[in-house]
Image (cartoon, helix red, strand yellow):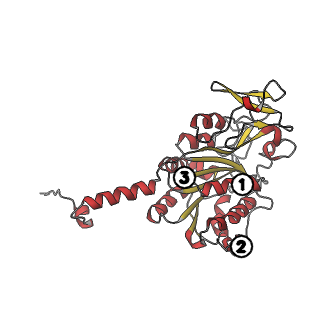
Amino acid sequence: MSTLTAKDFASDQDVKWCPGCGDYSILKQVQSILPETGLKPEEIVFVSGIGCSSRFPYYMNTYGMHSIHGRAATIATGLKMTRPELSVWIITGDGDGLSIGGNHTIHLLRRNLDVQVLLFNNEIYGLTKGQYSPTSEFGKKTKSSPYGTIDHPINPIALALGAQGTFVARTIDRDPQHLRYILREAVNHSGTSFVEIYQNCNVFNDGAFNAFSDKNQKAETTINLIKGEPLIFGTNRDKGIRLDGCRPEIVPLDGSYSPDDLWIHDPSDLNKAWILANFFEMPGSESFFPRPFGIFYQTSRPTYEYLVNHQLNLVKSKSTDASISKLIAGNITWVVE
């Protein structure tokens, strides 16, 4: 049993985010669950790109790298390939990971390296002072879209599922208990764990997720995904979601329907995960369904680093004359006259 505590994973650097930023909560919860892994600080690496969230490695008493914009996934890939025994975490934001780094995020997910991706989603570019980001809602007025953005927002969960992610989840900074639960599940998953974290930017996009965090609203606007349990929500837990074929519908639990009639959450079902990912409308819209939080999808697949090293060992075992110099020189030559 580890004798380490959260303090052993906190660096001596002063944490410098805006007062009230949701990043403080995420940092605290990550530090709180790391002792449970049984790993030492020197066995863990945090890699970040550029953005407010990317200051994260400075505040961890582990190895870390504050890398370049959008390239945290590539650097973490190289690290994991050469040091597969390390626990590697990628800290990114909706701009860093879904705009300039979107391509790298997709390929990381499909390759399935054994890393944790924490995507801090505040639906804004905070570090550069309030421009709209890939996840900003349609019509959002910002410094770079004074008349309202005309871009349709990226749905991070749908993107991760489409990229064949093996662990796809969502949580929120203002629910520490749920955040810790998802982090524990992510670190115990073998493969790429993609965790979208709704994170409030109280300076440039304050209240973006109030509909899903405010105690007077969230019972009606959110649904907690729990394996093996029916999809029930509402202030009095008097509503549920059932499937009519592949079409979800909200039904009252007033006697006409019971929990036995409802959709039972199964995170191994990719088709149902896709339906849940598209519960993406805001409250008040005609097609609104409660926003899901929890593990959308989880499956098992060999990790990329395992497959690469297995292939290398297999090739080496069949080679009787392994030579780097011969590999570089090759067996074809040319004479230039």
Horizontally, residue 236 falls left or right of residue 109, namely right
Amino acid under label 2? Lys
| 280 in relation to 126, above or below | above
Label 2 vs 1, first from the N-terminus: 2
Instruction: Give the residue at x 73% y 68%.
Output: 15
Residue 242 percent location from the top left of the image: 71, 29
Mark 3 nearby-residue class (10 Å; few <14, some 14–19, many ≥20): many
Residue under label 1: 179
Instruction: Name the disc covering residue 7, or none.
Output: 2
Residue at mark 3:
192
Figure check: 11 above or below 260: below
Q: Residue at x 60, y 39 (%)?
A: 158
Sequence-wise, the earlier of marks 3 and 2 is 2
287 to 31, vertically: above or below: above
Badge 1 local density, few (<14 within 10 Å), some, or many (20+)?
many
Pointers 3 and 1 in contact (CB under 8 A)? no
Q: Secondary structure at mark 1?
A: helix
Three-letter amino acid code at the position of disc 3: Thr
Label 2 Cα crowd, 10 Å radius (few <14 / some 14-19 / many 20+): some
Residue type of the residue flagged with mark 1: Leu
> Which of these two is toward me, 7 or 118?
7
Counting from the top left corner in percent of width and height, residue 181 is at 70, 54
The reply to whether residue 151 is visible in this rendering is no
The residue positioned 67% from the left and 47% from the top of the image is: 170
Residue at 50 percent across and 60 percent down: it is: 75
Pick the quarter of the image with the N terminus.
Answer: bottom right
Q: Earlier in the sequence, mark 3 or mark 1?
A: 1
